[in-house]
Amino acid sequence: MKQNIFVLGLDEPGHSELAALPHAGWCSFHGILTLEDLQDGLISLADLLEQAEEQLDAFDGPIDAIVGYWDFPVSVMVPILCQRYGLPTKPLEGVVKCEHKYWSRLEQQKVIDEYPGFDLIDIHDPSARLPRHMTYPAWLKPIKSFSSEGAHQVKDEKELQEALAEEREAPERIGGAFDYVLEKLDLPEEVAEIPGGAYMVEEAAGGQQYTLEGYSWGDQIEIIGLVDSFNYENVPSFLKYQYPSTLPEPVQQHIHDVSRRVISAVGLTDSTFNIEYFWDASAERLRLLEINSRHSQSHAQMFHWVDGQPNHAVMLDLALGREPRMPSRQGNHAIAAKWMLRHFQDGVVRKVPTADTIRAIEQRYDNVSIDIEVAVEEGARLSDADTEDSYSFTLAEIFIAGDTEQQLGDIYDACCEDLAIEIADDVEGA
């Protein structure tokens, strides 16, 4: 009998990746809610959990696992639902210690030194300033958000005040839902009185960004790999993720050690995770940016091409109570990258590639996969869609694998030319 695996926010790319897993033939994958249900508008966690339970209770058969690889609210819904249905899962407190940005910093302070200056800030206080122990540049960010929503990089007091003013007027989407989760935990005194919609400031870290992927099996913490992140020039927007990392081995081992210490400190057991870092090579300084209590679906195809198995496999093993077995460098390619094709000002989409055009590009190579953003349709205004940052608009995500970094770059340039997306720029947005 097949095992029934329920996936929160299951989409077509995710279903294809899961269906390609080893032993996937023994599984039936069922979606619970859509990404739009989970992430659009004001988020009510109580309502989402109720809807998820209705779908689960209506299923005529055994429920063998509940999984998810998206950010909040999926990240906290998985352990809540698993506990209700008596399934193996990660501890909710460990998840929240990772995802509550302020609480996470307090836990990190206990075991590592590789974190930036940070503090809470009251956005509704007209006299709010950057704390004296901190320096610019800095980030203003909610203690809980997803896709960098509500985050602002500020280089001086003027920009901080502008960001504070903007967030005072912004609609509240997540705070209430995060409060719902916090009420389920026995919080320490230094966290208990902080509302879910609170904000904090952190000193900006210099250098290049990297993401470590790993998992815990009980108290055992294993590293899957380190992914390099590259930004567009002079803009804090991602150009590409690339795997495996080109960092020197001693630096990678340092990141591995820090990661094991913080995952152990927050008590995140039986879970995939990814941790974002900045490494400043000139200063030889490491800074931990944030801990996510899930693996990144953005890296799944890269791990598949290079290691021979996507990181989804680890999530599935843990959900079924099995010790994961993740191969290393057993894939068909030496290097892989996910490129983000972006546009850097508002405008109206005038031309998009057809499905046949995209299929023809993918068939030209055996190592290319292209995903055009849903919002990129003829006549659509870029600013009407949700964005992952306040600096750019994503037009397409292009996955490429090969033998060398130069080869990947050449294929990416050819793909961009063949896609031929056209945007009529409209700076005024009128």
Image: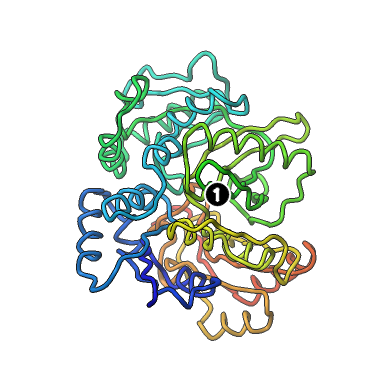
Give the amino acid type for the residue marked by disc 1 in the picture. Answer: Tyr
- Location of the N terminus by quadrant is bottom left
At mark 1, the secondary structure is strand
The one of 394 and 384 positioned closer to us in this rendering: 394
Residue at image coords 80%, 64%: 404
Q: Position of residue 38 (x, y in %)?
A: 32, 57
Q: In the rendered image of this protein, does residue 343 appear above or below residue 92?
A: below
Mark 1 surroundings: few (<14), some (14-19) or many (≥20) residues within 10 A? many
Q: In the rendered image of this protein, does residue 211 appear above or below residue 163?
A: below
Q: Which residue is denoted by mark 1 in the rendering?
A: 215
Q: Position of residue 9 (x, y in %)?
A: 37, 62
Q: Is residue 426 visible?
A: no
227 with respect to 187 (left or right): right
Q: Position of residue 109 (x, y in %)?
A: 54, 23
Q: In the rendered image of this protein, does residue 132 appear above or below residue 413?
A: above
Q: Quadrant of residue 59?
A: bottom left
Residue at image coords 23%, 66%: 55
Residue at image coords 42%, 45%: 149
Q: How is the image coloured?
A: rainbow
- Farthest residue to the top: give it: 132
The one of 396 and 55 positioned closer to us in this rendering: 55
32 with respect to 130 (left or right): left
Q: Quadrant of residue 430?
A: bottom left
